[in-house]
Image (cartoon, rainbow, N blue to C red):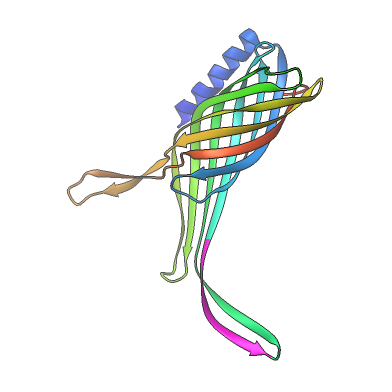
Amino acid sequence: MNSTIKIIFISFSLVSLLFSQGKMTEFNIGLLGPTDAESGFYGGLNLGRMVDENVGVSLGVHVYHSSYTKESRVGENKDGQIVISETATELDQSATLIPLFFQLHYTGPITNALDLKVTAGVGYELLWNSITNFELEKDGTDFYSGFGWNVGAGVSLPISRASDFYGELFYHGGSPSRDAGKTEEGFPVRSEIDMGGLGVRIGLRLYTFGL
């Protein structure tokens, strides 16, 4: 993990020092639907520099979060004209993913008022899966990590000389894992969660500040 993050930072620093022309920052929010988890919030912050008028590089810190609650109806009471329902919570679960990406950005004109926007990134991601099972009286958090990547395409609308509004469809890829012990025969076991899935996001790019 540490070596992967170091490579990301070193790569970004070298590109920035050699080719940087101006600062660039992006804020975005959206939705991601992973294969092995519920659809949830996905947002991020990208700090970087422009290589030229069309190409930029950035370091991105993104966050995915989803929650799930399993409930069952256990009773119903009537108090005059009011019906009171009683619900028991059997399971509470939440997942939080933090991908750290080195990214390349491209924007190019489609029309005079609209640009094509393409994003691609690779990096490392951290996942926390928290579960409270009231029936089994179990409560805990499992930590997963591993390689991640993303690619997106959309349109960008300049709203001033120093800012753009954009929308993108993107695909997030990654299957963070953790050591799950050994089998009776002594073979190592790995648990993993497939966080790959399609997403959509909107955002704002500012050219006035960045790394």
Residue 209 position in % (x across, y down): 75, 23
Residue 17 position in % (x across, y down): 63, 11
* Residue lying at the far left of the rendered structure: 185
* Residue lying at the far top of the rendered structure: 18
- Look at the image and tell me in which quarter the N terminus lies: top left
Q: Residue drawn 62% across and 32% down?
A: 168
Q: Is residue 148 left or right of residue 66?
A: left
Q: Is residue 208 left or right of residue 9?
A: right
Residue 147 lies, with reference to residue 106, above or below; the image says below
Q: Is residue 49 left or right of residue 39?
A: right
Q: Residue drawn 80% across and 22% down?
A: 162
Stretch in magenta? 69-79
* Location of residue 146 by image quarter: top left
Residue 67 position in % (x across, y down): 55, 55
**How many callouts does the rendering have?**
0
Q: Is residue 146 magenta?
A: no
- Look at the image and tell me in which quarter the C terminus lies: top right
Q: Looking at the image, which is closer to me, 199 or 187?
A: 199
